[in-house]
Image (cartoon, grey):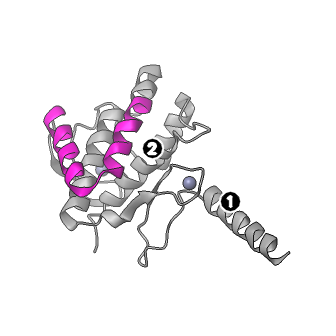
Amino acid sequence: MRFAHDTEPALRAAVRLVNSAEEPDTMTTLAQLREFYRDEGYTGRAPRGADELAAVRDLRPRLRALLTADRDRAAELVNEVFAEVATQPRLVRHDDLDWHLHVVEDDSPLPVRVLVETATAMVDLIRADEFSRLSLCAADDCTGVVLDLTRNRSKIFCSPACSNGAAVAAYRERRRRAD
Ligand SMILES: [Zn+2]
Ligand SMILES: [Zn+2]
């Protein structure tokens, strides 16, 4: 299964944003929001001001609900987004990106774009019935979301920190049993 090439970056950005709410919160300053914008390859209007940061932070629970819903519930949530936001879908080609869909105006505030782009990416996931790509982190003390785009579906931790932590815990457990 291959998703549209803008689906994966949109899901990756949404998962990163949702997981930024894990302790310690890593989306608390405008500098962190600008870093997110830059790293995730957004174009168009850059984030500005405390209001936009607050709106992005407030968006996280909604994105989390969308990314962790089952397929039928996700379809409802996606429809709510499309009913709420005035979309203007059009195909564009810019920088070194081939034809892809822009769904809202490029000068829309970042939280609006993130919400709509996540919903659009979920359309792809729903149509393809690929919900096993999204899960919750396997680490005991973590509620992070895991996006698994690997061929053999081997990803179970949300971050290197969680997979390293689990490796250390498993090692200790083996040592304890060996004693
Ligand atoms: Zn684009
Ligand atoms: Zn984790």
- Residue at label 2? 18
54 left or right of 101? right
In front here: 96 or 138?
A: 138
In front here: 82 or 141?
A: 141
x then y, percent, for residue 172: 77, 67
Q: Which residue does the image show at 16% across and 43% down from the upper left?
A: 79
x then y, percent, for residue 7: 30, 58
Circles 2 and 1, Cβ within 8 Å, touching? The answer is no
Q: Is residue 49 above or below residue 28?
A: above
Magenta residues, as a range? 56-84
Residue type at mark 2: give it.
Answer: Val
If you read the primary sequence from the N terminus, does the residue marked by circle 2 or circle 1 appear first? 2
The stretch drawn in magenta includes residue 112: no
Distance from Cα at disc 2 to Cα at disc 1? 20 Å
The stretch drawn in magenta includes residue 60: yes
- Residue at label 1? 165
**Which quadrant, please, contains the N terminus?**
bottom left
Query: How many C-alpha atoms fall within 10 Å of the one at disc 2: few (<14), some, or many (≥20)?
Result: many
In front here: 52 or 66?
A: 66
